[in-house]
Amino acid sequence: MTIFRPAYESDLKAMYEVFYQNEIRDSPDLRPPRHIPPYMRHVLQTGTLSVAEQDGEIIAFAGAITREKITFLTDLFVLPAHQSKQLGKTLLQSVLPQDHLIHCTIGSPDPRALALYIRTGMRPQWPYIVLVLERPAHKWEALPHIQIVEAAPDDPALVHWDAQISGRKRPTDHSHWVHEQQAVPLWFQQEGQTIGYEYVRLAGTETLWYPEAYALGPIGASTEDIATACVLAATDWALRQTQTVLLGVPGPHPCLTPLLARGFHIIDIETFLSSAQKPFFDPQCYVPSGGDLF
């Protein structure tokens, strides 16, 4: 008999094992995780996590966070041996109830997952492209006309800027990036005017393949015209500290071509889905924090 229930702190290790088993299906040599990603505990504490349990074993889980009018599905994973048994559908209904909120997620390339999300009312909007740059052989092109200023971690202006560009106010997530993922917040300025913001996360990335990478995001720019310059400036700052940089970029964002031209390569292509009739943010001005909290 399968039991569906809220998740507890003691479930996190077993839940991450469900995620890990999904990831290694096509990569049997993938090394085991060293620790549970901090975002999972953050979702437990500030969102909703549900599990499916059978004979005392957690076989599936789902998570979601709600920030103002937006509910983002952070996770939906089922052990490979238990897939195609309606577990995902039941868990999805438990964390995405029928309400007036906008539901959205980053969907994997699995057609079954995409079909499930579409049946719940979310529609594919554009590809979400994950990029990595490892040990660039050439010198990164700096942008002298962009000034990078480290921000105070508790600067309320960061929350305000992010709310305007990402489409929802989320101070708890800002605190998580700084305190749990060792993020350094940055301001981008041009001719004395602030034109954007960025978080460079030094730890706690969710990827198993690049655990030492510095993850970029969120990155927000005031206009599409300077969006690419902000992403390039963020990369320039990060490469002074590390040799591996990771970020996920919405398909419409203008930075994709310049990043690929400068040595980034694509490691994954997923899909952003949303129930919103109109976009709640501009994907040409915003690079998310990743597929975990978006």
Image (spheres, rainbow, N blue to C red):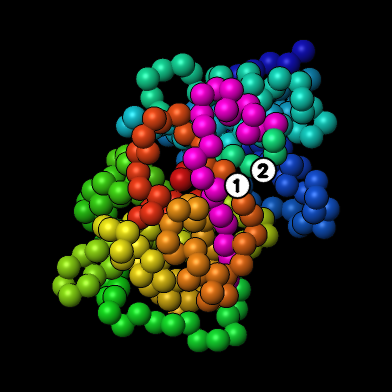
Query: Element at badge 1?
Result: strand
Is 125 contained in the magenta span?
yes
Query: Element at badge 2?
Result: loop
Q: Is residue 115 left or right of residue 290?
A: right
Q: Amino acid at mark 1?
A: Glu
User: In the picture shown, does residue 215 fall above or below 69?
Assistant: below
- Span of residues in magenta: 112-133
Query: In the picture, residue 78 is in which quadrant?
Result: top right
Q: Amino acid at mark 2?
A: Pro
**For the residues bearing labels 2 and 1, Cβ distance under 8 angstroms:** yes
Q: Is residue 186 visible?
A: no
Identify the residue shown where x is 35% and y is 62%: 227
**Sequence-wise, which precedes: disc 2 or disc 1?**
2
Quickly name the residue at label 1: 270
Quickly name the residue at label 2: 109
Q: Is residue 249 visible?
A: yes
Is 132 contained in the magenta span?
yes
Identify the residue shown where x is 69% and y is 35%: 111
